[in-house]
Image (cartoon, coloured by chain):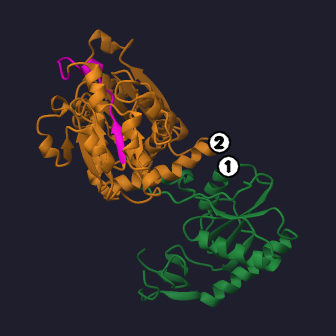
Chain colours: A orange, B green
Amino acid sequence: MKKHLVSAHDLTAEDAVLVLDTAKELAQVSDRPVKKLPTLRGRTVVNLFFEDSTRTRISFEAASKRLSADVINFSAKGSSVSKGESLKDTAQTLQSMGADAVVIRHGSSGAPYLLATKNWIDAIVINAGDGTHEHPTQALLDAYTIRKHLKNNEGDLKGLKIAIVGDILHSRVARSNAILLKTLGATPIMVAPPTLLPVGIDSWNGQYSYDLDEVLPKVDAVMMLRVQQERMNAAYFPTTREYSRNFGLNAQRLKTMQKHALVLHPGPMNRGMEITAEVADSTNSVVIEQVANGVSVRMAVLYLLLGGTNNESGDNN
Amino acid sequence: MSANSRNSARVVLESTDISRALTRIAHEILENNKGSKNIVILGIPSRGVPLANRIAEKISEFEKTNIPVGSLDITMYRDDLRLKPPRALAPTKIPEGGIDHKVVILVDDVLFSGRTIRAALDALNDIGRPAMVQVAVLIDRGHRELPIRADYVGKNIPTSMNESVQVFLADTDENQEAVIISTGDQ
């Protein structure tokens, strides 16, 4: 494994399967009377969140604590960042406090990359979502959830077709998922109105479509993305009703899908917009389970990046 | 990984010897605990697991019952985690009924420094509270670094520190079965 996890590109197929296998074993910890392992005792994990988040931050916090790491939560609100402190100065402050890992979420694409490559800090860097770039641990937990249901929790995702539907343009989840799914041998299919597909979608060398109804019967899982109102600074579609009618997942559309097909959503859901309440609460939906799996997967990532020797000899395994 | 690839290697136990040792250990466990009641056998991956299964099979056969058997991965409890690159985890399978108020027999292939058993004791602590913990090993090679001993030993083999003891089992090593001591650059 590489030292940092900034992009889903940092993971080879073997690395990704190792993370998923490790997560599978660590998932058992949640069922035990003592939900804790001593593995990262004495290590410090800083949750550096420049952007709001509920589940990702809590998930990382729970994962760190279950591995006995010390957790420091940092949110931009109420910190010196609101006084204009730069990322570099913030990073160096964390360095001198002895952070061993920095979990960073930032509104600007590339902030984790800067942190990982600029030698401001020795800590390992885990990207918890940067701008419209990537969110690799979300992709890992989606892959874990899909593998658990459709591949008996073993190996890779060869042969599966997964539709990713919605705001592909602004979605870091979509980008990381597209990369990781390909790495694991699955075929991602992007579905969105033309305005919400990024320029250069051809170079993602996955498939894409503008027609949800045509794609749904073919896929083994569908990943609904949140329509990110906060990033909708141009008229990407005429009305939310029209979007919902063409690209929302409702009960009728669910009926056209294969019986075993899964419905995923990274949350938070806009019920009634990209997904109806009926579908979100249906038996095909694994949205709640994704949250639980997120903790296991993040434990696996923290263990694999932080559990052994740092980078001296750790690169060759 | 071939059993006879090293020049300085010698075989100390062959397949039949291993089988006899496990049979004796199974009998000793029954004798010591006055039967098989409350016994849970946990193997430590990787080679402790097939050994645990075989001991449990033998006891089940002698006693005409089903002895609960499982595995206990101790990777996350090791004290040398930070000295090496992260290891892949092995499955932990605790039999139904858990380990509370049970006699847990930990099974491993080689007892050396005792650190694996220490880690296993820590791991057990997080899973439940056994009435008693006993340790069974196929080989005790000495050189303990902690105050830990085995209750059941297949064979005591005094070794020097620059020797290495390797256990090959039919289930994990492509049907080769032997215990081999080799010297030299390990």
Asked if residue A228 is positioned above or below residue A176 in the image, the reply reads above
Going by the image, does A165 lie left or right of A18? left
Alpha-carbon span between mark 1 and mark 2: 7 Å
Can residue A219 be seen from the camera position used here?
yes
Q: Where is residue A281 in the image (x, y as percent from the top left)?
A: 49, 33
Mark 1 lies on residue: B127
What subunit carries mark 1?
B
Q: What stretch is highlighted in magenta?
A: A221-237
Quadrant placement of the C terminus of chain B:
bottom left
Observer-nearest of B88 and A263: A263
Numbered mark located on residue B118 in the image: none
Q: Where is residue A142 in the image (x, y as percent from the top left)?
A: 39, 43
Can residue A7 be seen from the camera position used here?
no
Q: How crowded is mark 2: few (under 14 residues within 10 Å), some or many (20 or more)?
A: few
Going by the image, does A53 lie left or right of A174? right
Report the number of numbered marks. Answer: 2
Going by the image, does A262 lie left or right of B143? left
Observer-nearest of A314 and A194: A194
What amino acid type is highlighted by mark number 1? Ile
Residue A232 inside the magenta-drawn segment: yes
Label 2, secondary structure: give it. Answer: loop
Mark 2 lies on residue: A34
Instruction: Identify the residue at image location x=37%, y=33%.
Output: A103
Instruction: Identify the residue at image location x=15%, y=40%.
Output: A201
Determine contact: label 1, label 2, CB under 8 Å.
yes
Quadrant placement of the N terminus of chain B:
bottom left
